[in-house]
Amino acid sequence: MSYITIEITMRLIYSTIFIRLLVIMLPCIVLFLIACANKQTNATKAFKNSNLVSNSNNKSLKTSTIDNEKEYKELHLIQEQFSRQLLLKQNEYTKLCDRNEADSCVKLALSHQLNYSATQYEIYNIYNKANKIYDEECRNGNMSACSGLGALYESGDGVEQDIYKSKALYKKACDGKDARGCLNIGLEIRGCISCESNMENIKRALPYFEKACKYGSNSACHMKTQSQRDLENLINSNL
């Protein structure tokens, strides 16, 4: 499952900003969500089936109830496995963050937020460290770091929130041919993907998705295609 596919769902849980920071961690989270969805669906089916059987045979109901309980136990086991895997990744992120790799610091902070394994103060300090590393690297010409710094200023993680500074950093990164910077500008202009489409916003966002796609972002290519389709539908609906 592509991470743009789950972006809309995750926006309902966190925010667009948080999703942008989750980019590299998404494959692990996607697998977890798929497994949970499958288990939940099976459990629901088992419950419905048990209701049907109960009308004719109490013994069958008892068997279905046991099966249903097994499904939920399996779901709980998957959640525990996910938490353990996340803890293992935290060890890796900690080592890399200690080596002043800003992206790993962000992943470390996010993993703590997902796993509730650190205090807000500790998480803030990790983000703040990432901010300082990004800032230095951005000043030295690392456009990817400028995008990362822009995301932190947009969300206010580890720094005081500053939307204008965030936009300026995204633009600097995009002008420097960084795909993430272009994509983030496009997402900001486009706004809520699941909301009613706005033709002017799509027109303004589309060039940034095209640039980001050209610079190697698969998600931007998806957004480009979706925006082109939405724009075509809007034009046809106004004919």
Image (cartoon, helix red, strand yellow):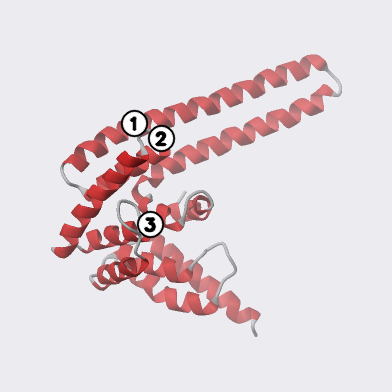
Q: Quadrant of residue 136?
A: bottom left
Provide the secondary structure element on which disc 1 rests: helix
Q: At which x and y percent is residue 59? A: 78, 14
Q: Secondary structure at mark 2?
A: helix
Marker disc for residue 87: 1
**Residue for point 19% across, 62% down:** 138
**Residue named by callout 3:** 155
**Three-letter amino acid code at the position of disc 1:** Leu
User: From the viewer's perspective, is 43 left or right of 84?
Assistant: right
Q: Are marks 1 and 2 in contact (CB under 8 Å)?
A: yes
Label 2 near label 3: C-beta < 8 Å? no
Q: Earlier in the sequence, mark 1 or mark 3?
A: 1
Q: Horizontal placement of 25 versus 14: left or right? A: left
> What percent of the width, then of the height, locates residue 163?
37, 66
The type of residue carrying mark 2 is Asn
Q: Residue at x 51, y 80 (%)?
A: 200
Where does the image place residue 122, in percent across and percent down from the top left?
A: 30, 39
Instruction: Classify mark 2: residues with Cα within 10 Å, few (<14), some (14-19) or many (20+).
Output: some
Q: Is residue 230 above or below residue 72?
A: below
Task: Determine crowd level at label 1: few under 14, some 14-19, many 20+ residues with C-alpha closer than 10 A.
Answer: some
**Based on the displayed image, in which of its 4 quarters is residue 189 positioned?**
bottom left
The residue that appears at 49% across and 76% down in the rendered structure is 201
Disc ID at residue 115: 2
- Going by the numbered disc 3, the residue's amino acid type is Ser
Secondary structure type for disc 3: helix
Nearer the observer, 30 or 125? 125
